[in-house]
Amino acid sequence: MEDYYDIVIFGYLQAVQEYDENPALSRFQFSTIAWTKMNDCLMKHYAYENKPKRKAPTVNIHAYAKDGLTLDEILPDRRKCLQAQAADRLFVMEVLSCLTETERQMVHLKADGLTCREIAEIFSTTVHGIHGRFRRMRMRLTEMDF
């Protein structure tokens, strides 16, 4: 019960602030606004706690599993995967070295999940310009046999 209090108190405080600052809310009962805000905070908390990344299983490298197995016995291909990741990283670094600084920034922004429209806003250009830039980068890398 104490855990929920720590979560919903912020919703209650938001309700107090909004009720005081927004005179249009005076037509509603404060309890209705407070209940809605506290429920919203609780739902956001549940959504945050149930994200797949937060539910990922974790294993201590030095600990043993329940059956007495080590991490290397549980994940025998782990080292191969690390080698493949290192090779991929070197390949990406080699590819990025063939791009200009602006193109590298665009690639990093695209890799971070930004849309072409967002990248165009950052570089003060059009979406078509960004698409063209990426097309020319792909053509240049294809000519270099990447």
Image (cartoon, helix red, strand yellow):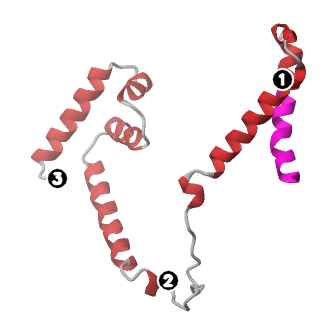
* Residue to which mark 2 is pinned: 71
Mark 2 secondary-structure assignment: helix
Label number found at residue 32: 1
Q: Residue at x 38, y 24 (%)?
A: 117
Give the structural element (helix, strand or loop) at label 1. helix
Lower sequence index among marks 1 and 2: 1
| Tag in front: 1 or 2 | 1
Residue neighbourhood size for the residue with mark 2, other residues' Cα within 10 Å, grouped as few (<14), some (14–19), many (≥20): some
- The residue that label 3 is drawn on is 146
Q: Position of residue 55 (x, y in %)?
A: 58, 60
Residue at x 38%, y 72% (from the top left corner): 82
Residue 26 image position (x, y, % from top left): 87, 10
Residue 92: x percent and y percent? Answer: 30, 55
Q: Is residue 56 left or right of residue 108?
A: right
Of the pair 42 and 118, the residue shown nearer to us: 42
Q: Which residues are magenta?
A: 1-14
